[in-house]
Image (cartoon, rainbow, N blue to C red):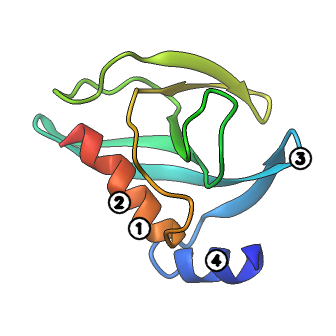
Amino acid sequence: MSAEKLAALQLFYPTAELLTEGGQIVVFLPGLTVETPQGLVETDALLLPSLHSTGYTTRLFLARQIEAPSAKNWTSHSLCGRSWWACSWQGVGADLPWIDMIANHLRAFR
């Protein structure tokens, strides 16, 4: 199932790859382009398409914090041997296709 979801995602993000963290699948998105009011920002990202230990249904972690009006309450996390940042952004369901998850998470930065 994850291989099918990854193949669909790779139509938009060809460099996306599956990793695991604590027995959960995560999707590595190198060089993700994030649209902000100040312009485009490129950063590595991790999509956790399932429940995170912090209670979020899904999470998008970025290699760095990005300044944007709705991106608030940043927290640092250690995943896949790296430090990542996540802002408080709720309501992105685990039942969505991965491309839709990413699109919904990226709304926090517009």
Q: Quadrant of the N terminus?
A: bottom right
Mark 3 and mark 4: Cα distance apart in space: 18 Å
Q: State the CA–CA distance, disc 2 to disc 1.
A: 5 Å
Residue position for label 2: 103
Q: Secondary structure at mark 4?
A: helix
Relative to 81, does residue 107 appear above or below in the rendering?
below
Q: State the SS at label 2.
A: helix
Which one is earlier in the sequence, the residue at label 2 or at label 4?
4
Between 57 and 33, which is closer to the camera in this rendering? 57
User: Which is more N-terminal, label 1 or label 3?
Assistant: 3
> Please, what is the three-letter code of the amino acid marked with disc 3?
Gly
User: Could you say where residue 28 lies in the image, as x and y percent from the top left?
Assistant: 64, 52
Return the residue at label 1. Answer: 100
Residue at the spot of label 4:
5
Mark 1 → mark 4, Cα distance in angstroms? 11 Å
Q: Is residue 70 above or below residue 109?
A: above
Tell me the CA gap for discs 2 and 3.
25 Å
Taking the spot 49% from the left edge, 69% from the top edge, the residue there is 96
Instruction: State which tag comes first along the sequence, 1 or 4.
Output: 4
Q: Which numbered disc, 3 or 4, marks the residue that appears first in the sequence?
A: 4
